Structure formats: structure tokens, C-alpha cells
Image (cartoon, coloured by chain):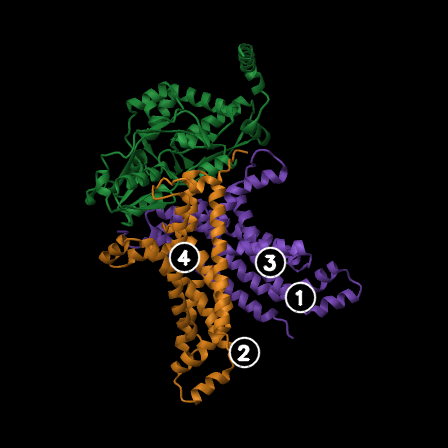
Amino acid sequence: MFGQFDLSVIRDALPYLFAQGMVFTLTLTALAASGGLVLGTGLALLRLSGVPGLTHAAKLYVELMRALPLVLVIFWFYFLVPYLGAWAIGSDTPIQVGAFASALVTFTLFEAAYFSEIVRAGIQSIPKGQGAAARALGMSPAQAMRLVVLPQAMRNMLPLLLTQTIVLFQDTSLVYVLSLTDFLGAASKVAQRDGRLVEMYLFAALVYFAICFAASLLVRRLQARTAIVR
Amino acid sequence: MTYTWNWGIFFEPSPEGAGTYADMLLSGLAWTVATALCSWIIAFALGSVVGVMRTLPSRAANAVGAAYVEGFRNVPLLVQMFLWYFVLPELLPRDLGTAVKQMPDAPFYTAVLCLGFFTAARVAEQVRAGLRSLPRGQTQAALALGLTRAQTYRHVLLPNAYRIILPPLTSEFLNNLKNTSVALTIGLLELTARARAMQEFSFQVFEAFTAATLLYVALNLVVIAGATLLERRVAVPGGR
Amino acid sequence: MHLSHALLLAALAISAATAPARAQELSGTLKKVKDTGAITIGYRDASVPFSYLDGNQKPVGYAFEICLKVADAVKAHLKRDTLEVRLNPVTSATRIPLIANGTIDLECGSTTNNADRQRQAAFTNTHFLTATRFVAKREKGLDKTDDLKGRTVVSTSGTTNIRQINEINTARGLGMRILPAKDHAEAFLMVETGRADAFVMDDVLLAALVAGSKTPEAYAISSEAQSRPEPYGIMLRKDDPAFKAVVDAATAALYKSPEGRALYEKWFTQPIPPRGINLKLPMSEAMQKVFANPSDSPDPAAY
């Protein structure tokens, strides 16, 4: 039905696929990973803070996000973010949030839950004595966390954080459900327009595989190099 | 704001004529559970085989296992879904491809296969980690007692490994459950798809999504409770 | 009692008389557009020829051009030199929530104006009339609604059509399996690849999909319609009379002018991008009446 493989379809679509689709995917991944890490670290600190209200609120948030499918969360935020924004700035009409911004907020908030679990485990992996020693040297709790515990914890959890970022990179393909033009969205638009599903989807799979596989090999090498000798 | 709440919406009849909106969501829940369970059977069986292959002395078995895991782990689930649904039937012989496409409930079978193979790669990694964590003496002792390698895995190594990896397996099971929602892209009428359909028909976005959220949370709690019971049930007396 | 009625009437008369003056104090969408200097248009991926992506993946189409004209009218109304037109993709399923939550200001596509949807959004004057039918491969010989008995049928999620076919399925006990697709292109693809037997949709969209397919002669559109001809309108936020008045005036002026007719002919009787297909759908009598007397009624009987 689709005839022979037609590589020219892929060749003609390359500029669109990469200049628009892949750029969208990579930008979204990079921004959501940075935002997710910052927010995730905050959540982890709240959870370890020992302040009852904060600990529970952070735990509830993390557990709720982790219980829900990403697709559902994407729909939630796509419709909810404008209302949240209006509420945040005290406007009485929903504010306008572009599709990219909405996707960015969604992935940042969603990934923060996963990053926070990694960060929490990382902080807990640092012996308690280190924090205590830093305090004994006259550091404030914040200084002890920032200067002593977190740098070592980050080093320990870097491979896991990067692996989670690869997962995020793959997950961004789900913006397909909102008809946004990420890499997969671009591929599927061309595939549907030209009736060339076999070529376009196989090509998309190949590109994702090449990028993720290469990235995971790099992470593994990094892991071998940064492991702290104990 | 232009949003009007209406929590009574769940008891209004859905335009599909087969009951209320609540029934619509519950039928979605049933599909979600069915898809998750069926795909888990594939994932667990295949994942165990691949995981075992990666711990065998044979280099070939190792390579095949590693290729499987890398292949299925490094391609987004949604892309895999499209490969199974749109690409595979075109690569089959024409008649077989047509038969596959005209199968009733094709989205369900496709989703089960796709999720099964996808999750198997993740189960395989856990099984491998579990087997690796066992002291080498167990294998040596079993082989010395005259067990074959298959018997060693069957009676000694795997039962121990499964106990160790029960917690990560539980979280893989939950991931698999959540991943069923990706199948809405190929037309599976699971919970998220039904919540969205309810939103489209009734325009009550937030009620529909709140209900779906609560149902997913409830499913999670049931699975976690089940896993805790199972953990207690299979714990080796005196161990830990 | 009578006195209070009279007072009420007087109050109404005064407020009506002062309404134009008060409209100068902007509110709602007009205020937002003025403050931000931008208006956001929601467009569709594949609602040929109303709103879709051309060969360069840029939105074009009949309804899309109407929206650009409306944006011009809004710019003139606000007496601005420039007005940025932002574009946001929408699907059948996301368009109504996105209008309500303020992501888009105008939805330009193929949205059926009906009483149900009027509770969620407002519609300006009708720009097209279309009935629900289905398309199937010619070789399958499906032509009447009853031919769909026991078949796998696809429709686009979030449309009035999927709702109608669900209702027909239940009412007549046809036992169809109804799959929702994300957009029209994906739904047609299901028929093309044999995943579904028929695609239920507005007949004009089906005609465009068939004309744009690789083998137009391989498909047949049902002779029996599953609904009366229903109006398409451009969607706006509801409860925003000032904005609606501007949009209504702009569309009415456009439809009555020769420019409106030319716009129709450009998209329905001449070759259109991306592949130069001609839909060959000259303006029907009902459509001529719609253009002569623009109306935003959701009632099919009004046309």
C-alpha cells in the first residue's frame, strides 16, 4: 500500500524535522530539566526539613505527581495553567499562556517530583556526620547544606539526574497529544501529509535511539569517572 | 472567569447512551486495568528471560539481552506505539497485515504487546540487578549439588532475586499502569481517554480530570497495598 | 408595580442609549488585546480548506483568512497602527477549553455552532453549512447509515460528529466500534490504512480529504447524511458582547461584500495549496442566503 521505501520523503523533510521539531524538543528538555532540578531540590529540602507541614506538603505533591500518567498531567496543565496564572497575578480573566510555555510548566512541575526523589536519596547518601561536622565548625544549617552536603550529593547523583533527563527527552514526545510540533509531532505531520508513515516513524525511532543511546553511554562513562572512592 | 462547576455531571447520561458519565469513566478504568495486567504478564515473563540471559556465561546470550534492553529503552514509548500500530502491519505480508488491522479491538492488543515489550526491558534490568546481587556461592553450591544451570535459576537464584527486587518491580508495575494512557493515541478507550471524551461531551474539564486523578490515585494505593501484602507473604522466615 | 416597570424600562432605555459610550471603556478581550498589543488566533492542523498547514507548515485557509480580516477590524477599532497576530495550534478536543481559558481569542476552523456549545463559547456569523456523512473505501460498498452495522468506525474526538454517530449507534443498535482520532488527518489515515471501515465527519471536510488523498477515486462519501446541514462559525469567548459586536460587524461586512464571495471562491472553486487541488464546491443556494443575511443562529432550521 505504501509502495517501496522512499528516502527522499525524509530528505525533503529534514530541515523542518530538525530546525523546528528537534529544536523544540531540545529546548523543552533543557529548560524543563533545569527548572525541574531547581524545584526538585527545593522539594527534597522541604521534605527533609523536618517541619511537619512542609514535609507533608512536599511529600503529597511528589507522591501525587508520581501516581499520575504524564498524559493526564499534560492535559490538566494545558487547561489549568491560564487559570493558575490569573490567580497568581490576581487577574480576573484567565491569562494567555502559549502552548510552549504551557508544556514547559507541565514538564517542569512533573519532572520536579522525579528529580526531588533523586536529590533526596542523594542527600541522604551523605553521612550525617558531615553535616554535623560542618555545623560544629560554625556553619549555619543553610551553609552546611549548600557548601558541604549538596556538592557531594550532586556528584553522587549526577548519573541518575542525567538518566532522568534522557527519560524526560523521550517523554517530551507526548506533547504530540496537544498537536505541538516537537520532533515526533513534526515527523507525524509530514507522515500524515505525504502518507509515508513507515519511513517517517522508523526514521523518528532511529533518531531518538541514536541520541538516547549515545547519551546513555556518555552517562555511563561519567559514572565510572565521578564515582567517589570510599 | 468563565468556568462553571457542576459536580452533578457524573450522574447525567453520557451522549453515548450507554449510561452516565460515571459509567463512562469506570469503563475506561476497566480497560486501563485489563491493559496493564495483560501487558505485565508479557513484561514479567519476557523480562525475566532477558534478565537471565544477561547473567549467563554465554557471550551471545549477553549480547542479545543487552541489545534488547538498549533497543527498547532508548526509543520513546509513543514512537514504539506508532511502530506497532502503523508500521508493523505494513511490513507484514499483505493479507496478514490486513487481517491484523481489521482485528476487533486492535488498539487493545497493540497496546498490550507494545507495553509488554517496552516494560520487559525495564523488568530485565531489575532481574539482572537482583541476580547480580546474590552471592556467587549460591550458583556454585547449586551446581556442585548437581543441579543443571536451568534448575539452578529455577529453584535457587530466581526465587531469591524476585524477593529482593519486589519493591522496584512494584514501581515498574505502577509505571506500566500509568503508561497505558499513552495508548489513547492509538484509540484505546482507557481512563485518560474517557476523561477527555467526557470533557469534550460535557465541557466540564476539571470535574472530568479530577475524577480520573482520584481513580489513578486509588489504583496506585491498591497496588501498593497488594505489594506490601505480597512482600510479607513471600518473605523468607528469619531473613532480615 | 406599573411604575416600577416603567422605571425599569426607562433605565434600560438609558443604559441602551449610553451603551456605545460605555463601550469606549474597554473590557474583556478588547482590553486585553489593547493592553498586550496582540491577538491570538487558534488554527487547525488539517481542516482543509478552512484552516490547515500548507506545504511550508504555515496555517492557511478560508476561515483562517476570515480571522485575519477580523484581526484587521479589531486593529482599526482600537485605532492601533500595529497589532501582532499570534498563532496557536488547536485540536477539536482542545479548542473550547482554550477559548474559555484565554489561550486563544479567535478560533478559526470548522467548528459547528450549536446550542450546546453556546453555553461554553460564543460564535460569530456563520461562514459555512455542512452535514455529517461518512467516507469509506469504494470497494467496501458502504453508502447508508445501516451499512455501518458491526463495523469499525472512526471520528475525530471532540466533534459534534462523534457525538452524533454515538447517538445513532445506540438508538439503532448498530453495534459499531467507534474509535476517537486526534485530528481529521489521523482519522482519514485510519481508513486509508484499513484500521477503520469508515470515517464520520462533516461532508465538506471529507470531500477535501478525499480530493487531497493519493487515490481520490478509491473513496466514496455516503449518500445518506447523518445530520441536517449545520452552521460553522468562528468561536470567541462568551459573555464578551463588546468584542463580539466588533467581530460580528467585521464578518457581516466581509460576507456581504464582493470580497467575501471572492474569498469563498478562492478556497472552494480554485486550486488550493499545498498540492493545487480544486475542491469544485460552488456556492450553494443556502450559502448565498447566509452571505446575504449573515446570522449567528445555532439552529440548523434557520438556514
Instruction: Give left or right: position of B220 versus A12.
Output: right
Question: Rounded to the nearest whole Å, what is the CA distance between mark 2 and mark 3?
Answer: 32 Å
Question: Rounded to the nearest whole Å, what is the CA distance between mark 1 and mark 2?
Answer: 33 Å
Observer-side mark, 3 or 4, equals: 4
Question: Rounded to the nearest whole Å, what is the CA distance between mark 3 and mark 1?
Answer: 16 Å
> Which residue shows up at 59% across the image and 40% down it?
A85
Which color was chain C given?
green
Q: Which residue is mark 1?
A: A152
Q: Which residue is mark 4?
A: B33
On the rendered image, what quadrant is the N terminus of chain B found in?
top right
Q: Which residue is mark 3?
A: A116
Q: Amino acid at mark 1?
A: Gln
**Residue B39 vertical position relative to residue C79 in the rendered view, above or below:** below
**To which chain does the residue with label 2 belong?**
B
> What is the x, y in percent for residue B13?
38, 40
Q: How many numbered discs sit on the rendered protein? A: 4
Q: Amino acid at mark 2?
A: Gly
Q: Secondary structure at mark 4?
A: helix
Q: Secondary structure at mark 2?
A: loop
